Image (cartoon, rainbow, N blue to C red):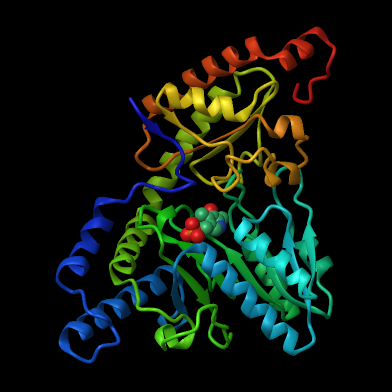
Amino acid sequence: MRIYADNAATTKMSRTAIDAMLPYLETVYGNPSSLHTVGQEAKEALEDARTRIAALLGAAPREIYFTSGGSEADNQAIRSAAILGKRKGKTHIISTAFEHHAVLHTLKKLEKEGFTVTYLDVHENGLVTPEQVEAAITPETCLVTIMYANNEIGTIQPIRAIGAVCRKAGVLFHTDAVQAVGHIPVNVAEDNIDMLSLSAHKFHGPKGIGVLYAKRGIILSSLIEGGAQERNKRAGTENIPAIMGMAAAMEEAVRSLPETMPRVTALRDRLIAGLNEIPHGALNGDAKNRLPGNVNFCFEGIEGESLLLLLDDRGVCASSGSACTSGSLDPSHVLLAIGRPHEVAHGSLRLTLDASATEAEVDAIIAAVQEVVEYLRNMSPVWRELMNGERKFVID
Ligand SMILES: *Cc1c(COP(=O)(O)O)cnc(C)c1O
């Protein structure tokens, strides 16, 4: 038995996505910039994918730029807004302390280049408020960048209201929607979004392909110099097979939301209820405003890495939080941002379900986690101190 519960790290490609790619690997292999028939067939496919993806987001085709994934889209969105801001003498950016590293590291670089960044506090529930954003905006603010849904704790921000605040103040608003698209409804027009990043491999599409949406009128700067692809904003021959796989996967994921969202949410809540039975454990992030498939717990007296290895032995693929920080000994910046102390943040477990999950799998995960947590606690000196009263519990 193997249960894959790490869909926030990446997803298995869907049959639909693979089938949509094959013709572009086998027969329609042209370069869209070529003038001959083989090239022009590829060009037609490219523009067809652009139109379909735009429609799913409530955007216009010319507002869609293909990138190598979510990281590149985040980098380009933030860099572009910074360059536009600097031209007007505006060098202040607003974000949060628990963004993805593609955002945080870009902001850190900009700080070295003279920008000032306000990192809004996320409350204990993992949410920021539109009021916090409004209060942080100054006449120097050129960009607000706040993620749609968090990749570790799954909390969904009040994006529409934050977007409205930015619109009113005339400040550009970017959102990293990599965890949101294909998992909850996202519409750039209704949500007041100026720029948005998405990535195909988070919704059963291929890896290495994503989109930067930029509202008409926003002048992007290119990160990569070269040919005139993507209206001069992203050089490099387009990855047509991946783009076609992404369009198909996105259509499938977005169109099935009315069916998958309630079903996956019920499985998530079943998993949360089961893990809540474990003493001295707690759910991280708001219980309601969270992604349908996301469960993230802290268990006291547990070391996250051992928990993951023992779960893997029992056939459960899980994560301690972000795939990017696993292997490092630093506790998750997201858990620290919501106020979890270091020693508890080390004992975190993220389980992320997709629409293929079943009740039987959820029950098997619950049993495995209960068993492994008890086993590790019995061996843990920290747990002994907690039980003896030599150390205080952080989680009741
Ligand atoms: C996965 C992820 C990214 C990075 O996307 P890639 O396509 O892997 O570069 C960015 N932001 C969030 C929130 C993510 O979950």
Relative to 85, is 204 above or below?
Answer: above
Image coordinates of residue 104 in percent, x first then y, are 68, 60
Residue 208 falls in which quadrant of the image?
Answer: bottom left
Residue 191 falls in which quadrant of the image?
Answer: bottom right
Relative to 66, is 39 above or below?
Answer: below
Residue 237 falls in which quadrant of the image?
Answer: bottom left
Residue at 44%, 36% (x, y): give it. 5
Relative to 231, is 196 above or below?
Answer: above
Image coordinates of residue 295 in percent, x first then y, are 55, 36
Task: Name the residue furthest top.
Answer: 388
Nearest the viewer among 334 and 187 is 334
Say which quadrant the C terminus sits in.
top right
Lateral position of residue 82 relative to residue 362, left or right = right
Total tally of numbered discs in the picture: 0
Image coordinates of residue 385 in percent, x first then y, are 79, 12
Nearest the viewer among 170 and 85 is 85
Residue at 43%, 56% (x, y): give it. 182
Relative to 278, is 271 above or below?
Answer: below
Residue at 20%, 81% (x, y): give it. 41
Say which quadrant the N terminus sits in.
top left
Image coordinates of residue 106 in percent, x first then y, are 66, 66
Q: Is residue 163 visible?
A: yes
Q: Is residue 185 visible?
A: no
